[in-house]
Image (cartoon, rainbow, N blue to C red):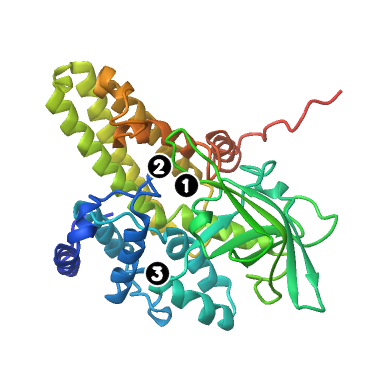
């Protein structure tokens, strides 16, 4: 795997850098790159406008095939874009779920009519999406989904009833892709379907969840007779499990690249803080910072290697290694940040509860070891499906 820029890569990098220099100005530059993990609600209206600026010059959905409005960009060019984007301190993206998850899933499983209806607004940054997977009793155990959808033949609609939880940015979204049970009496992976449900309608109640950061990126979503058209099933009825796994594959893939580059920015800021307050002169602290740098480089190389091996929307079990690795790394970075700050890290930046970037990382990164499959679930997958170990006991027997 040669990570050096080829001549065509260098030309693309210069194109990206030049465009960002010309456009990350004014209110967009004033955001200072904010809008990442634990900070998704910051400057949201301005960031939404930024999506339209990106779209107007063809900088959204780079990896999508050209026939759907993307650039058909190679993995190398997508990496370059993400690197330069973070270096330019461009605004945090608000359409990640649309561009990186549901868009590619529709491209692979959608009908021509679904592609024509849903892909252009994602490309333009004019419709936002959220993910209706987790439920109170179906988080990492997604196959335990209980939200139901019943077909009303007379109206030609699916009627959706149930509860989703930890739904990122549901209060800002226009649509939700919902995994629900469409076959009465079905269990586990069988009888599930993947519905595309509009959020702005009677029967959808979104309740923000206030987090340790005092922000509310996550939400509870209650569906009480909410409706969506009969044709808004992605894939076949009853085949929702396969489509849901494909979406998770995209979440483990290219969508992770921008996430990792933002980690590098956080680490660089932390190293600068350690130098400024003298903590970098402590050999133990210096070693911890060096270790964080080395581990982040390992994460980058392994992600690039895994992306080069993926053929289509199927996440190999090894993808769980990357999820476990980055979630644990970011949690550890938050703890390291508080140690670098010392006692000052325990005091809010401003009244009544204004946090700095390191305090937000420390508090929010705990959630990253839970969402998208908890660390414990990832370890089970790695043990059973990668290493071939015996499965975990499902319950005591007498």
Tag 3 secondary structure: loop
Residue at screen point 42% across, 38% down = 325
Residue at (28% x, 54% y) in the render: 1
Element type where label 2 sits in the image: loop
Say what secondary structure mark 1 lies in: loop
From the top left corner, tell me how far across and down residue 286 is, in percent: 20, 23
Q: Are marks 2 and 1 in contact (CB under 8 Å)?
A: yes
Task: Decide which of tag 1 and tag 3 comes sooner along the chain.
Answer: 3
Q: Is residue 324 above or below residue 69?
A: above
The image shows residue 144, relative to residue 333, as above or below, that is below
Q: Pointer 1: what residue?
A: 217
Query: Is there CB contact under 8 Å for labels 3 and 2?
Result: no
Neighbour tally class for label 3: few under 14, some 14-19, many 20 plus, Cα within 10 Å: many
Residue at image coords 34%, 50%:
35
User: Quadrant of residue 264 in the image?
Assistant: top left
- Kindly identify which numbered label has been placed on residue 125: 3
């Amino acid at each position: 795997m040669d990570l050096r820029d080829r001549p065509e890569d260098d030309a693309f990098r210069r194109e990206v850098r030049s465009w960002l220099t010309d456009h990350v100005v004014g209110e967009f530059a004033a955001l200072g790159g904010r809008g990442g993990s634990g900070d998704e609600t910051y400057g949201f209206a301005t960031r939404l406008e930024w999506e339209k600026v990106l779209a107007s010059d063809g900088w959204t959905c780079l990896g999508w095939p050209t026939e759907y409005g993307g650039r058909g960009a190679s993995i190398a060019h997508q990496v370059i874009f993400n690197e330069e984007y973070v270096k330019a301190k461009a605004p945090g993206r608000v359409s990640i779920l649309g561009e990186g998850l549901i868009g590619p899933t529709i491209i692979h499983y959608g009908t021509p009519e679904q592609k024509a209806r849903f892909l252009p607004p994602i490309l333009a940054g004019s419709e936002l999406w959220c993910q209706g997977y987790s439920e109170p009793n179906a988080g990492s155990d997604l196959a335990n989904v209980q939200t139901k959808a019943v077909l009303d033949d007379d109206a030609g609609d699916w009627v959706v009833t149930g509860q989703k939880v930890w739904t990122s940015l549901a209060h800002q979204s226009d649509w939700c892709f919902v995994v629900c049970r469409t076959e009465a009496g079905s269990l586990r992976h069988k009888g599930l379907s993947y519905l595309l449900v509009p959020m702005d309608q009677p029967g959808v109640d979104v309740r923000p969840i206030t987090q340790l950061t005092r922000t509310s990126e996550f939400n509870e979503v209650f569906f009480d007779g909410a409706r969506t058209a009969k044709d808004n099933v992605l894939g076949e009825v009853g085949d929702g499990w396969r489509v849901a796994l494909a979406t998770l594959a995209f979440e483990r893939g290219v969508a992770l690249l921008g996430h990792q580059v933002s980690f590098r920015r956080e680490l660089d800021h932390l190293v600068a803080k350690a130098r400024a307050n003298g903590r970098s002169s402590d050999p133990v602290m210096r070693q911890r910072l060096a270790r964080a740098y080395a581990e982040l480089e390992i994460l980058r190389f392994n992600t690039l290697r895994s992306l080069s091996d993926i053929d289509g929307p199927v996440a190999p079990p090894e993808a769980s290694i990357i999820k476990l690795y980055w979630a644990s790394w970011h949690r550890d970075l938050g703890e390291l940040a508080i140690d670098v700050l010392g006692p000052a890290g325990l005091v809010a930046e401003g009244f009544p509860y204004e946090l700095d970037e390191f305090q937000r990382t420390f508090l929010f990164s705990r959630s990253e070891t839970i969402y998208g499959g908890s660390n414990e679930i990832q370890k089970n997958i790695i043990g059973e499906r990668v290493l071939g170990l015996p499965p975990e006991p499902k319950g005591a027997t007498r």
